[in-house]
Image: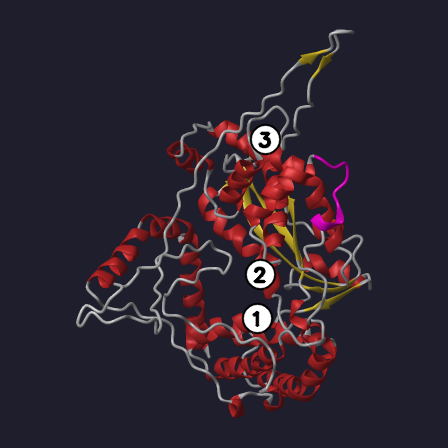
Amino acid sequence: MIISDMQHKLAKWAQDERTRRFDRLLRLIADRTWLTEAARVALASSGAKTPGPPCQEPEDEQLPVPELATSTLEEPPKPTRGKPRVRSDVERERVTLQSPKACPECGGELRLIGEDVSELVEFITAKLKVIETARPKTSCRVCEKIVQAPAPTRPIEKSSAGASLLAHILISKFDDHLPLYRQNEILARHGIDIPRSTLSDWCGLAMKTLAPLSELLKAEVMLSDRLHTDDTPIDVLGRQFKAASGSGKASRQGRIWTYVRDDRPFAGEAPPIAAYWFSANRKADNPRCHLKEFSGILQADAYAGYKQLYDSGDIKEAACWAHWRRDFHDIFTATKSELARYALEQIGKLYDIERQISGKPPDLRHEVRQKHSKPIAQAFKAWCEAQLTRISGKSPLAKAIRYGLSRWHAFTLFLDEGRVAIDNNAAERAVRPIALGRKNFLFAGSMAGGETLADAMTLIETAKLNGLNPQEYLTDVLARIVTVRSVPPYLVAFD
């Protein structure tokens, strides 16, 4: 047992060491991405095929719930071994190569018996367009009154930035994670030189224009009675932090919080929303403030700051099996423990069932879980309790087991409520873009920059959750929102 603990601690130390070097490593990988691309090009030019993901369809009798084997659920697309997938709405141009009118062998008449069709994908380079709006002035010959058409509204007052350009800048920064200096270089190639300071101002002013919509989305998400939540760190620059920090760093670690409504797993009709908040710290006051109007089920990790919310009785805790599974996975990776392997297998059985009932109504999900998942969970609990009497209480495995057993009510809530997910992956997916962006822009430029980031992510990620092209969506909203005094319902309801 001592050796096992030492192995786990060594693996944990190695993981922490890797974490400290992770940012630098990611930047190094990004700088050398061309090596991978060059290797693929070399393989392609030599005629060799690049390996694709294996495709294996489970047989009906292998499924954990055989009666759902004939489900009418939409099948996920099969892997296509690297073949590009073009959306159906992409413009297509048909070119027909005509055959000779007479047979080249005997001169006989030819008749059509079929055709071979191949596709070639071309890229039309984006281009800028300057729209000159002329407003002729006219005067009355009788009273000399000057008459002129009113100036059109603009997304940013007194700015030359159109809605589509602003949307492109916002998407490039907050969704494609391109820093403004790179955007400056890209736009210069297209024929316009926009200083970085101007790009920064446009981002802030465009998000100020869009603020009413992001606030409505945040209010809308809190009307739900079931939410996923997670948070992730982000560094914030500020000279005021330099004196306060012992190291003299002019930055501090802020947080981005997300709250996700996603009813699609149980065929709910409400459109999904991912709302984001920024805070200067990770104190419990932040989620308490965000959720002051919320009551219902909150699916989250084990962050202690949520405890006060659960104690109030208005919010019920739902835990994340993926989070618990990760603990057993780390132990197995470090020590190859057979006990950890068994735990992973039992949790895997629960996920096998969840895959079959994804997208099904709550009543069916509840019925299947009670019949198939509940016995597995009860047996797993008994196994966990038995292991605690046999292994060292200080071992990593014992700590992992106690983590789940101490919150068993939260881990098993999904068994009694068909609308509750087995894990908190919806929120973890929602914060992933923040982590990706952090590797590129590294920090928020100010506290206000953190708020801008949260509002931008609210709009962009919600649009993506609803199957919308975020650039087309923001272009449309920026063109319309300045023409109305209040945001119309269609801008909130993404259905």
Residue in view at x 54 percent, y 80 percent: 348
The relative height of residue 161 versus residue 87 in the rendered view (above or below) is: above
The magenta stretch is 483-491
Among the two numbered marks 3 and 2 on one chain, the one whose residue lies closer to the N terminus: 3
Q: Considering the numbered disc 3 on the image, is that residue within a helix, a strand or a loop?
A: helix
Rounded to the nearest angstrom, the CA distance separating label 2 from label 1 is 10 Å
- Mark 2: few/some/many CA within 10 Å (<14, 14-19, 20+): some
The relative height of residue 455 versus residue 297 in the rendered view (above or below) is: above
- Foreground disc of the pair 3, 1: 1
Residue beneath disc 2 = 428
**Do the numbered discs 2 and 1 sit on residues whose CB atoms are within 8 Å?**
yes
Among the two numbered marks 3 and 1 on one chain, the one whose residue lies closer to the N terminus: 3
Residue 435 on image: x %, y %: 51, 52
Q: Amino acid at mark 1?
A: Ala
Q: Is residue 443 left or right of residue 290?
A: left
Residue most extreme to the right:
313
Among the two numbered marks 2 and 1 on one chain, the one whose residue lies closer to the N terminus: 1
**Do the numbered discs 3 and 2 sit on residues whose CB atoms are within 8 Å?**
no
Residue beneath disc 1 = 322
The quadrant of the picture occupied by the C terminus is bottom right
Residue in view at x 23 percent, y 63 percent: 43
Residue 494 on image: x %, y %: 68, 55
Q: Is residue 180 left or right of residue 262?
A: left
Q: Is 488 one of the magenta-colored residues?
A: yes
Quadrant position of residue 126: top left
